[in-house]
Amino acid sequence: MPDTALSPAPEARAGFPIEEALCEIVSNDAVNAEYRLMIARAPEAALRARAGQFFHLLCPATEAGQPFLRRPMSIYRIDRARGEIGFLYKVTGKGTRGLATLRPGETLNALGPLGRGFTLPQGTRHVMILGRGVGLATMAPLARLAAESGAAVTAVLSARSPELVMSRAELAAAGARVIEVVDTDGSSAPEEMEPHLTALHDERAFDYIATCGSNRLFRLARGLARSWGITGEIALEQHMGCGLGMCYACVIPVALPGGGEEYRRVCWDGPVFTLEEAMGW
């Protein structure tokens, strides 16, 4: 397994922990018909990123114009030994089309690391990861975090079809047992997954669940966590303005322990929330 040293992060030196980093593009290649993987050399401050955090990326202009706002992008890979960070992204709009134009040797302007990442409870022995689509980008660093903490990892990768399943090699390299479920054969349906996951729990009990990428997976994960009496977290996505908690453009309602709800900022209070406080993906 590569020496990524995701956890614990090195002690931060004196200075502001969030920086506007100028990162040299190493590669920016398509991984399938919809997604691309961008690797960039990053300075020390950016390499302090933790699983679940994100960067706010300045996207280059294209013929379609200059994106007005940066784009939040979760961290897919942190390789401190090589001094590199990676982003797995789907080309869907003006911002990500701009990112797709970056070539090796060009510069990516990345503000971060930002937000609150995953908190793996001390003594965790077996982690279940449920991810779908772009949500799998957030899960890969968590698998390494868990493995480096001595926990076993079972990762369930969900996709519309087998050719769109991503991150299997990344998660397997992190030591995770990888299970693929897809829409085309019905195996990704929650009613099909629940008995399978319950059988895995009976075989070797899970004590932490993390999910990202789907409301169906969120509801399944929360129900299983409640049934098994364990904790869990979800990484959320939201359109953002500043990414620093100042503009309140990314607020969402969250459930309070005693009942009721309040609004919180995904960029500042998240993007990772507990399964009990989150109200949807």
Image: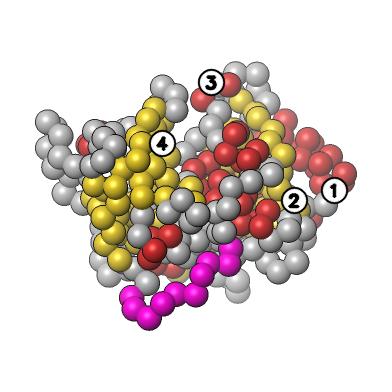
Spatial distance from mark 1 to mark 3, Cα to Cα? Answer: 30 Å
Q: Disc 3 marks which residue?
A: 163
For label 4, count other residues whose C-alpha is less than 10 Å away and answer few (under 14), some (14-19) or many (20+): some
**N-terminal-most mark, 4 or 1:** 4
Count residues near mark 2 (Cα–Cα under 10 Å), then give few for <14, some for 14-19, many for 20+: many
The front one of 30 and 197 is 30
Q: Nearer the viewer, mark 3 or mark 2?
A: 2
Separation of marks 1 and 2 at Cα, in angstroms: 10 Å
Q: Position of residue 206 (x, y in %)?
A: 77, 52
Tag 3's secondary structure?
Answer: helix
| Mark 1 or 2, closer to the camera | 2
Identify residue type, mark 3: Glu
Apparent side of residue 47 relative to residue 70 in the rendered image (left or right) = right
The answer to if 88 sits in the magenta stretch is: no
Which residue is found at the position 55% from the left and 28% from the top?
Answer: 165
Amino acid marked by disc 4: Leu
In the displayed structure image, the side of residue 230 where residue 134 appears, left or right: left
Residue to which mark 4 is pinned: 37
Question: How far apart, in angstroms, are the residues tagged by discs 4 and 3?
Answer: 16 Å
Q: Which residues are magenta?
A: 7-16
